[in-house]
């Protein structure tokens, strides 16, 4: 990269030097031509003022010959018919062409002054011609000088040009080298710092460099390293959760399987002869089988909600009907726990799956009843606000410790494992609630205090998001 920057820098400098030299040459040539024309015009107007056109013009011109010959100039007086009246060159005027065809003469007649550059067959060199009409007579005065433009100065200027080129290139080479170092050094430092990471993505530290763009690279690299660290931490957390889930799932399934196996062996061996006891064993086997079925169904529901594979049939669901059905189904549970439920539901309707809304509300109310105190109360309120469905379930039960609130939505997590076992259930209720809320792009918040109660607040958009 450093070599590429150096080469590009030198290429740009050389291109600029060549271009500026060309522009200088063109500008200087134009200025030289303009000044030469101006001087020749001034000389012609001066001669026009001092010539005595009443005398013999050839004698008048002869007197000027010494003055104009000093710089190899040529002075010519031309009649309006194009013939030469007098010339400082000793040539036969009859042998000369008609001068009306000359460009400078035509311009002088038409515009008051004229000039041209061309090779002179007479002088055998390139000449600059300037012509003006006389202000006092009908003659046209023309002056010509040898003119090569800037070419004659190139030999003098070339050493200075080459020297300036050399100085400029040397200076630019040193500047380019320093500039390339100022860019590549921070990049090398950044790469070397990244190589020191060795798996710990939070140890990166960079200096503040002179170029904001490189500072952006350093800051972005630091942010990326932190994101990688966070991502790895998240992967580790998810791995731990999966490991805990499989452990819990195995444990939850192993208990009913062991019970079923034990009861089945007793029946198979014929140890139990009492028909009533046999029927009791069969009922317990069915109950444990039902528990396993419920666990598996809940796990499958969570998996489908997580992967968005659930084939959900949606319709307009009236939440008051859902609430009434749930209250009827959990009334025996509430009575057995001596818990009073207070319900208030505004006439609100949401486009959703009725079974999922039943699962969501049913799990919240069941938990509020199960984990309450005798004589406790539960308040459930359902309203609509700003095109959102608001569900609030509050109880004055035992509450949840603050350190456990962040984990209550994990599968099989139980705050009080002993009490939870006694209360029954799959341990997946709140996890299902969380996944249903996420499925509808909603939010759920929890507030709780030990021995004071718990409140769940759910906010679900009633307009389906694409």
Image (cartoon, rainbow, N blue to C red):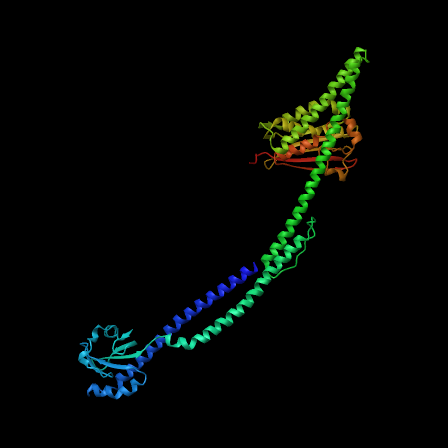
| x, y percent for residue 56 | 19, 87
Where, by quadrant of the figure, is residue 151 drawn?
Answer: bottom left
Name the residue: 67% across, 32% down.
433
Left/right of residue 221 with respect to residue 366 in the rendered view: left
Viewer-proximal residue among 374 and 53: 53
Tell me which residue sits at (58%, 57%) in the image: 213
115 sits left or right of 294 in the view: left
Give the residue at x 26% y 83%.
48
Identify whether 198 is placed above or below 179.
above
Q: Name above or below for residue 338 compared with residue 451.
A: above
**Left or right side of 156 for 414:** right
Residue 160 in percent (x, y) is at 46, 75
The relative height of residue 256 versus residue 24 in the rendered view (above or below) is above
* Frontmost residue, 218 versus 312: 218
Q: Count the numbered circles shown.
A: 0
Identify the residue at image location x=72%, y=35%: 243
Which of the 4 quarters of the picture holds residue 329?
top right
Residue 310: where, in percent of width, then height?
Answer: 60, 29
Residue 409: percent from the left, percent from the top?
70, 35
Q: Is residue 127 visible to the viewer in this orientation of the structure?
A: no
Q: Quadrant of the N terminus?
A: bottom right
């Amino acid at each position: 990269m450093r070599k590429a920057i150096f080469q590009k820098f030198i290429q740009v400098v050389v291109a600029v030097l060549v271009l500026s030299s060309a522009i200088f040459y063109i500008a200087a040539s134009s200025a030289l031509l303009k000044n030469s024309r101006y001087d020749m015009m001034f000389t012609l107007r001066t001669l026009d003022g001092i010539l005595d056109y009443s005398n013999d013009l050839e004698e008048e011109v002869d007197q000027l010959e010494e003055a104009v010959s000093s710089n190899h100039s040529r002075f010519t007086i031309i009649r309006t018919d194009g013939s030469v009246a007098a010339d400082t060159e000793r040539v036969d005027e009859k042998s000369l062409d008609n001068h009306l065809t000359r460009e400078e003469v035509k311009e002088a007649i038409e515009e008051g002054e004229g000039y041209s550059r061309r090779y002179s067959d007479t002088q055998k060199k390139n000449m600059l011609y300037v012509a003006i009409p006389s202000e006092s007579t009908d003659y046209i005065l023309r002056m010509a000088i040898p003119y090569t433009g800037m070419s004659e100065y190139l030999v003098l200027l070339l050493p200075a040009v080459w020297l300036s080129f050399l100085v400029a290139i040397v200076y630019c080479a040193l500047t380019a080298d320093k500039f390339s170092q100022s860019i590549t050094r921070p990049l090398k430092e950044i790469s070397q710092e990244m190589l020191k990471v060795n798996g710990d993505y939070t140890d990166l530290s960079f200096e503040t460099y002179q170029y904001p763009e490189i500072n952006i690279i350093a800051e972005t690299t630091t942010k990326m390293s932190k994101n990688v660290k966070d991502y790895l931490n998240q992967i580790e957390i998810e791995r731990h959760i999966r490991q805990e889930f499989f452990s819990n799932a195995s444990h939850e399934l192993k208990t009913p399987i062991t019970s079923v196996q034990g009861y089945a062996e007793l029946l198979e061996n014929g140890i139990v002869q009492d028909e009533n006891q046999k029927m009791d064993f069969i009922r317990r086997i069915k109950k444990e089988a039902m528990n396993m079925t419920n666990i598996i169904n809940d796990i499958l529901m969570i998996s489908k909600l997580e992967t968005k594979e659930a084939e959900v049939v949606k319709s307009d669901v009236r939440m008051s009907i859902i609430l009434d059905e749930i209250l009827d189904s959990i009334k025996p549970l509430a009575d057995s726990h001596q818990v009073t439920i207070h319900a208030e539901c505004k006439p609100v309707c949401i486009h959703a799956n009725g079974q999922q809304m039943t699962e969501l509300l049913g799990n919240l109310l069941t938990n509020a009843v199960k984990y309450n105190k005798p004589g406790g109360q539960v308040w459930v309120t359902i309203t609509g606000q700003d095109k959102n469905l608001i569900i609030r379930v509050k109880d004055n039960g035992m509450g949840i410790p603050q350190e456990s609130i962040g984990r209550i939505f994990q599968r099989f997590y139980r705050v009080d494992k002993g009490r939870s076992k006694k209360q029954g259930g799959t341990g997946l209720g709140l996890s299902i609630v969380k996944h249903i809320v996420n499925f509808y792009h909603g939010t759920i918040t929890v507030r709780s205090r030990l021995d004071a109660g718990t409140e769940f607040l759910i906010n679900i958009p009633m307009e389906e998001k694409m």
